[in-house]
Every structure is written in structure tokens, then in C-alpha cells.
Image (tube, helix red, strand yellow):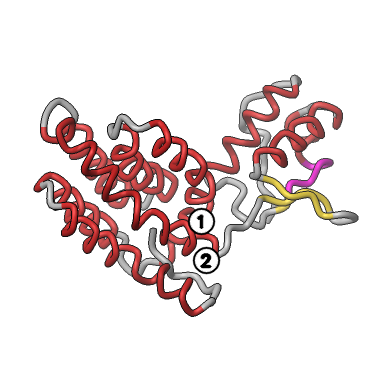
């Protein structure tokens, strides 16, 4: 079923249309692989196709949309292989980010770490997939943000959109979403202990399906990030 945009913010500017479409992609209203039909969106939003096409071009440049000749615009699908490659790099740099962030995490920012896990629990209890993805990403982003290292933050920023698109598909594949919260609570506990090696081992277990998929060159769902 095609997504409906009639209930969303009415706007006629390219910037406004861009925000509406981007929000619909990132909250899962339009899932990865979903088609963005110009005629239907223009009708739903009550706009001409000119600002819509500008918005779609911007989304394409951002890597959220791909235009297929003679077929139209589609939300990008992120493969397990891409996520596995990202996971293999994260396994090297995320423990370092956690090590750099440890002083802040043990001090004034500790509540932010525990809050992400609480938000993850709440989202899971409500079966709110977009909110669970938000909390999942916020948890990991925190290490990079608090590391004080601009290069590490840039690495995370370069991955986050792909991770979000993938997790919107991946989270519903869990037989029990509560497993995600349990995994992240363990990661938080190990991070606060300040044991970088233990954090890396826990992270490797968290990533194990993705890393195995990368090693075997498979592209099946079920990889965890």
C-alpha cells in the first residue's frame, strides 16, 4: 500500500516538502524500498510537482532516495553487507570512543546513558519501532558525541542514516524486541566499568551476526547493529 501524506504538514516550498518527505522516510512511514510516487504525493500535499522534484533531488543527493529510470524514486535499501562493513569498522573505533567518553559517562552524562536504555524499554513496551530505533542509535551515538574527538563524531554521522534505514527493517525481525534492551544494558554496564577489552568483546557479540555475514559475503537480514 502506498503511504499517504495528506495528514502531514501542508507546505509548498521545496524546503518544506523536503522536511516532510525526509521525516516520513526516517520514521518508517515510507519503508526502505518504498516508492515515492510524484503524482500521489503531489495530490496528498496539494502541491505542484516542481517543489516535489527539487525535494526528491535533495534526498537523492543525501543518499536517502534513489531514482530508477522509467520507474521513479524509491527509498534506499541498505544491505546486510553494507551494515556488516560498517560494523567491522565500529568494532575497532567504538571501544576507543567509549574509552574517551568514560569520564563524562561516569560523571555528569551518566544519566543520558541510562535514559537511552529507559527510552528503549518504553518504546519496546509500546511496540513503537521508530522510537526504538531512535533510542538504539542515541545509545551508540553517545560514545562518539562524548569522546571529544571530531573525527569519531564524523564517522558516526556518516553511518547514522544507513543504520537507521536498516534498523527500521531489522527491529521488527526480532522474535522478542526486549532482547535489544537487554543487550544495550549489558553494553552500558561494561562501558561504565572502563574495561575497553570487555567492551569490545560485548560489542563483538552484539555485532556477531553482521560480522559473520560480512565474512561469508551473505546479504540476508538478521544482522544486529
Asked whether, in this view, residue 149 is left or right of residue 68, the answer is left
- Distance CA(mark 2)–CA(mark 1): 8 Å
Give the side of residue 116 with respect to residue 129, left or right: left
Secondary structure of the residue carrying numbered label 1: helix
Residue assigned mark 1: 166
Residue in front for this viewpoint, 71 or 208: 208
Depth check: 38 or 151 in front? Answer: 151
Q: Position of residue 14 (x, y in %)?
A: 75, 24
Report if the CB atoms under discs 2 and 1 are less than 8 Å apart.
yes
Measured as percent of width and height from the top left, residue 107 is found at 11, 29
179 versus 128 height, above or below: below
Give the magenta-colored segment's residue range: 36-40
Residues 4 and 118: in front is: 118
Specify the label residue 60 is tagged with: none
- Residue at image coords 21%, 38%: 113
Mark closest to the chain's N terminus, 2 or 1: 2
- The quarter of the displayed image where residue 209 is located: bottom left
Q: Residue at x 30, y 37 (%)?
A: 142
Amino acid at each position: 500500500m502506498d503511504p499517504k501524506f495528506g495528514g502531514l504538514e501542508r507546505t509548498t516550498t521545496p524546503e518544506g516538502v523536503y522536511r516532510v518527505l525526509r521525516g516520513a522516510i526516517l520514521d518508517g512511514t515510507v519503508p526502505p524500498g518504498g516508492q515515492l510516487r510524484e503524482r500521489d504525493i503531489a495530490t496528498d500535499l496539494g502541491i505542484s510537482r516542481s517543489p516535489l522534484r527539487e525535494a526528491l533531488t535533495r534526498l537523492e543527493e543525501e543518499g536517502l532516495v534513489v531514482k530508477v529510470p522509467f520507474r521513479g524514486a524509491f527509498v534506499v535499501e541498505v544491505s546486510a553487507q553494507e551494515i556488516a562493513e560498517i560494523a567491522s569498522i565500529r568494532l575497532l573505533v567504538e571501544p576507543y570512543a567509549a574509552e574517551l567518553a568514560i569520564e563524562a559517562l561516569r560523571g555528569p552524562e551518566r544519566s543520558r546513558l541510562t535514559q537511552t536504555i529507559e527510552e528503549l524499554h518504553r518504546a519496546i513496551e509500546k511496540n513503537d519501532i521508530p522510537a526504538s530505533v531512535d533510542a538504539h542509535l542515541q545509545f551508540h551515538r553517545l560514545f562518539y558525541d562524548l569522546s571529544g574527538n571530531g573525527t569519531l563524531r564524523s564517522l558516526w554521522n556518516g553511518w547514522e542514516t544507513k543504520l537507521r534505514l536498516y534498523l527500521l527493517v531489522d527491529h521488527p525481525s526480532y522474535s522478542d524486541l526486549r532482547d535489544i534492551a537487554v543487550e544495550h544494558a549489558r553494553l552500558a554496564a561494561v562501558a561504565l566499568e572502563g574495561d575497553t577489552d570487555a567492551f569490545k568483546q560485548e560489542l563483538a557479540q552484539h555485532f556477531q551476526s553482521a560480522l559473520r555475514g560480512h565474512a561469508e559475503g551473505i546479504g540476508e537480514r538478521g544482522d544486529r547493529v
